[in-house]
Image (spheres, rainbow, N blue to C red):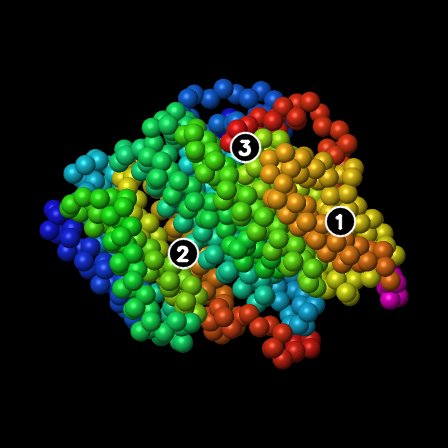
Amino acid sequence: MMLGLVLLPLLAGLAALAIRARRLRELLLLGTALLHVALVAAAALTRPAAAEGAWLALDDLGVLFLLVTSVLFLAVSFYAVGYLRREPEQQTDPEEGFLFSNEPEPTFVACLLLFLASMTLVTLSRHLGLLWVGIEATTLASAPLVYFHRQHRSLEATWRYLIVCSVGIALALLGNLLIAGAAGPAGSLGLDDLLARAPGLRREWLEAGFLLVLVGYGTKMGLAPMHGWLPDAHGESPSLVSALLSGALLNCAFLGILRVRQVLTAAGDSEFAAGPLVAFGLLSMGLAALLILRQPDYKRLLAYSSVEHMGVLSFGVGVGGVAAFGAMLHAVVHSLTKAALFLVAGNLLGAYATKRMAAVRGARAVVPASAALWVAGILALSGVPPFGIFLSELTILRGAAAHDLVPAALFLLFLGIAFAGVSAQALPMALGGDAGGRPRMREPVTRILPPLLLLAFALLLGAWLPAPLVRLVEGAARLAGGG
Amino acid sequence: MSALALLALTVVVLVNFRLLGGSRMVPIIRGGALQGVLLAGVAFALRFEHVGAESAALAILTAAIKGFLLPGLLLRALRQVEIRREVEPFVGYNLSLLFGALALGAGVLVSQRFAPGEGVQPLLASVGVFTLLTGLFLVVTRRKAITQALGYLVFENGIYAIGLCVAPEQPLLVELGILLDVLVAVFVMGIIIFHIQRDFSHIDVDALETPSERPREAGA
């Protein structure tokens, strides 16, 4: 069952390479995405029992992240079908005016599916070595996705993404090796094994290992100051890829950090992890908030906002307790909201052919549905009630304030700056000004429905948390929060 | 065993200095390959003695991939892009060598803390740390994409050596997975280097960064 979840998109991805007919490929993509969601839902409900020490198994933390990944992928694959049909073979670069072509479509669809397979592997892994293999595989599968538009800016972004993340992840491998070595030369990296033997592990090795893993996977997660690759990759890749990167990939890297923290917690050394997590969290939030203020490009604005929200996650689990619950909830609602916003950003880019915020005005007259979704999404992202992010950030704030006032005050300050920066720049795109005589454009349903459903989901979770979800998030927070 | 292993590790140290001080591409790539083979050789000896034949066989596969396949990929990319040497790295060659001396010292210090004792193990750890730092330094300070890719490879060599020292007994599947990931990573890097060359006629990553300064060719 667990293996099937990984194999399904893997095999589908390989098959997509060989399929020449576009219709068939679309069916394969959608069918795989639907089947994956169904299987994940079944696995989440039944929780098939796994043997102690199994390499692939689901716990609350894994289920939570896998659910988000799978649902996002389904939404994105619907969007992708419409996107690929309308994407011309050759087009003129809107900013510099040269001609470029796209990556062959079979390659793109195959890499999408392989990307899903690697992220599934990450969420299921109960072995730190296998987890590492999965996280590196996500980089390799997604690099060709970033380079869909074959022009020099996306090429540079791809190169930076590949080299920075590969080196970062290699650093995490070193951390993992130290953790294995903490149990002596025959030490294993099986999570169950490590958790059982945690109190007897060499503390110094474990701590050094955690720091390396935090910096290594933190690079991939986009924590400042290792976030250099993130705005480029998000800005230059097609919007549906940015949606997957921000909504699913960053969470997977975060999961890698949380797994090692679990070991540290089991060793009775949870406090050691808290400090760096809070520090990286606040640094990411603060730096991103400042960079958001002077960002001319709306896709990069969303990218920096992802750095900020990854900081929120790191801060939340670092504080622990109630804040860890908030952080796990935040991981879900941020993914839904951010993915929806990137998809809408793709619609705006399609209508205006520019990523400059100042050049996009009066979108409500040109693409009314997208404009409405944009406004709703920006409000949701900024933490306006009743959207889910309001609830999760409030929970984290409550947890932090009960703990220590200074970090809580900084947290609130950075959120405030980012709120002002994002809404002041992004809302006028839809609401302000006139469209400069642009005609109203048709908006196909594949481009509206996915972000609409994702946002509706984020809204629903802000207003009402179903009891099974609360239990799931609580379980995940217990594993992640070090309590 | 140990005399040969010590000799191999000494050569790895010398190769690191060659990498830091050299500018011509082909010898640098060959140096990285030699390093991979030597470390895999040390792994073979250590594992044959302590772990088992299976894991020793994996060392042979590692040697084949790191010594021939990966450098082969890089050399092929190099032929396609027709460049011979690194130009004006961000940090000059003399300073790079100075960094090498410091990194070697750091390696010895770190290994004394984490792997104290006599024999091959502590030396292996310090060589590993030195190699790792060399690779990281190459990635950060060199301009050409291909040198950065080589830096990544050297970085991986360092991690391999450290892993050999601190956690020699990992499951076969995980080792294979790691090897496969590195292989695919370098393969994808090779493809991208090729694209950088074909589309922009140079593989100076730094020069890609200033699109706004390029003349606009309307409709071209």
Identify which residue, A380 or A59, lies in the foreground. A380
Q: Position of residue A249 (x, y in %)?
A: 56, 45
Determine crowd level at label 1: few under 14, some 14-19, many 20+ residues with C-alpha closer than 10 A.
many
Residue appearing at x 69%, y 52% in the figure: A418
Cα gap from disc 3 to disc 1, whole angstroms: 29 Å
Q: Which mark is residue B12?
A: none
Mark 1 residue type: Ile
Q: Which mark is residue A481?
A: 3
Look at discs 1 and 2 and give the one toward the viewer: 1
Range shown magenta: A434-442
Chain where mark 3 sits: A
Identify which residue, A152 or B94, lies in the foreground. B94
Q: Which mark is residue B186?
A: 2
Chain where mark 1 sits: A
Cα gap from disc 2 to disc 3, whole angstroms: 37 Å
Task: Identify residue for label 1.
Answer: A378
Mark 3 residue type: Gly
Query: Contact (CB < 8 A) between labels 1 and 2?
Result: no
Do marks 2 and 3 share a subunit?
no
Specify whether A15 is left or right of B173.
right
Look at discs 3 and 1 and give the one toward the viewer: 3
Specify whether B173 is left or right of B198.
left
Cα gap from disc 1 to disc 2, whole angstroms: 39 Å
Q: Position of residue A263 (x, y in %)?
A: 43, 32
Identify which residue, A89 or A351, lies in the foreground. A351
Determine crowd level at label 2: few under 14, some 14-19, many 20+ residues with C-alpha closer than 10 A.
many
Q: Is residue A285 visible?
A: yes
Q: Tell me, yes or no, whether the highlighted magenta stretch contains residue A435.
A: yes
Q: Position of residue B211 (x, y in %)?
A: 60, 72
